[in-house]
Amino acid sequence: MKKDMPYSVLQRERQFSGSDRVTLVALLLAAALPLLTSNILVQSVASQALIGFCGALAVHLMLRLGLLNFSVPGFMAVGGYAAAIAAEYGVQDLFALLGIAFSAPVVLAIPIGWIVLRLKGVYFVLVTYLLTEIVQLVIVETPSLTGGTNGLIGFPPTTFFGTELISGPAVYYTCYAAAIVALFVALWSTRSYGDIYDSQAHNETLAQSLGLDTARYKAQAFPVSAGVAGLGGFALVQLLITAHPLSFTAASSVNYIAYVLIGGAASLLGALLGTVVLVTAITQFSWSGEYSLGLFGLLLIFSVLFMRDGVVGVFTKIAHTIRGRNQLAYPATQGDPT
Amino acid sequence: MSQAALSVEALSKSFGGLHVFKDLTFDLAPGEILGVIGPNGAGKTTLVNVLSNQLTATSGTVRLYGEVVSGRSFPATARLGLVRSFQHTSVFPTATVAENLVRARYFAGRPPQIHTEATELLEVCGLGAVFHRKAVDLPYGLQKTLGLVMSCLAEPKVLMMDEPAAGLERVERIVVDKLVHYASHVLECSIMIVEHDMDLIRRLCPRSIVLEGGKILAQGATPNVLSEPSVISAYLGEALEANDAVH
């Protein structure tokens, strides 16, 4: 809200925020990565970060409503498997597969949301965690469709205007396409309904008392979150060239939640920064063998203790401090003109 | 006889074997300001919760200008025009005052424009000076005031204020008078005020009902109700007698 706006006409805050712009620019710049380096390891880690970003966005969308969502790996599995199965049936076009990977979890999440969104707090957490376990069970118990415990291997490669996306950079750009679509969906959702989500997260009773049908917006956000997760699942399946149940375990939901909390739960930029920091850290720690999990845990404890608002919160504090110093350094701008 | 703004018929609410209130029947006329008083535990706040459909009634019917609102959802009831405010501070903490007001209008399905009288009200209530501050950074009194203003900006047909003066300093309580005046004269809505502040009830409510033990102990003109011996002994005790002696 601009300071000079007369409050006889109040407008909803729906513009892009500064952090949204930074997120968008950062992701657009990430398109140049394969041009800057041909290092396979760097491209692989970057691809993992893009996949993690999709998962983190899915967590972020529900966290904006105050709901901690553990069903992200489940919907990633639905998106990833749907695309892999579609490829087996001859659908190879990137855009079509992105559409399938997004739509399949959305369709599934609509009726599931009708049930699980009646729950709150720890009950919602528990049920969404179990949801991922149920998806795992369904995958394992339907081998004719999903390959069961062996997964789906050897499905035809994805194509982009007829060109097969099988090289390292091509796979990176496949993950990138999923991430950029996920970001635009998340931007649309948070810009269109951010104030509504925020109201529900912080004072749902007040929002309802004023006439907001909060159930409707939860029912809307849950499938969108599922669709975004599905895009991440598609990217993961493309990276691994396999759709396997172990890629989508319920335990992996902790990672996506950690990405958001470490980066900062209040913004999309937090999801991006948290993902980049933790995926990089996990890769670095993996060189330390048996100590890797311990180092990862220490990083999480340090972050929770000293960065309550995440990485974005630290940057925001620094920016406020600098702004405060600047104001002190030029008191004449506000002081007595004499 | 004109149609009641709010008509409550044989309304009951129980939690298992605990009967909070039983067979409450009363009307609120268009434009009327009704006081609801009673000792702690009499069921006043539960009554507001049930009337607004935040809680489901065990039995009974609530009508808003003849339309049955019982059994509707909490938000749907508010959209019909039966809006409540809260005893405690209730704001969107991370949003600015301006954003809180925008949300109140938007969630109630109202256009963003607000009356000139409302802008004046914001100034009088002290919210104009903190328009761009986050609600969480406001002192208690302003947060409470903001919550009350938001319920007014929803432009209800019937406004139920649950202890609007609770927690406010004596000098701040004049804000409640101004809000009630705005709601009554500008919005022309009916108002039900649940309150422990007897001075405020006397000032603002020509008619009152007294709840005690889940039943209506007395109802009628506020001065008469407050002077009834049964009300004095059941709720107000010697404090009011001493207060009356002073007045």
Image (spheres, rainbow, N blue to C red):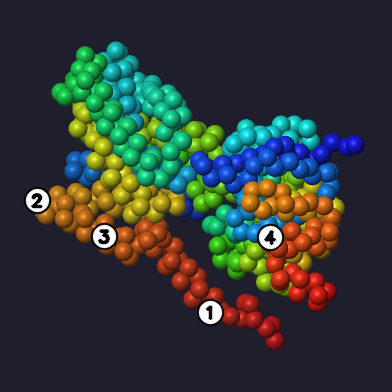
Q: How many marks?
A: 4
Count residues near mark 3 (Cα–Cα under 10 Å), then give few for <14, some for 14-19, many for 20+.
few
Image height check: is A167 above or below A322? above
- Image disc number at residue A328: 1
Which mark is on residue A146? Answer: none
The answer to which quarter of the image holds residue A245 is: top left
B27 relative position to A182: left or right: right
Can you give x and y, in whole percent of width and height, for residue A3 in the image? 66, 61
Q: Are marks 2 and 3 in contact (CB under 8 Å)?
A: no
Q: Which residue extends farthest right?
A: B1
Relative horizontal placement of residue A158, taking residue B204 as reference (left or right): left
**Amino acid on which the number 2 mark rests in the picture:** Gly
Amino acid on which the number 1 mark rests in the picture = Leu
Label 2 vs label 1: CA separation?
50 Å
Q: Does residue A316 show up? A: yes
Q: Identify the element where label 2 is drawn.
A: helix
Residue B113, how many percent across, how many down? Answer: 75, 48
**Residue marked by disc 4:** B234
| Residue A289 image label | 2
Q: Nearer the viewer, mark 3 or mark 1?
A: 3
Which sits earlier in the primary sequence, circle 2 or circle 3?
A: 2
Question: Of the residues tagged 4 and 2, which is closer to the observer?
Answer: 4
Answer with the quarter of the image where residue B59 lies: top right
Q: Amino acid at mark 4?
A: Ala
Gap in angstroms between the C-alphas marked 4 and 2: 74 Å
Image coordinates of residue B16 in percent, x first then y, are 50, 40
Say which amino acid is labelled 3: Ile
Image marks 4 and 3: residues in contact by CB distance under 8 Å? no
- Calculate the distance from the C-alpha at mark 4 to the C-alpha at mark 1: 61 Å
Same subunit, labels 3 and 1: the answer reads yes
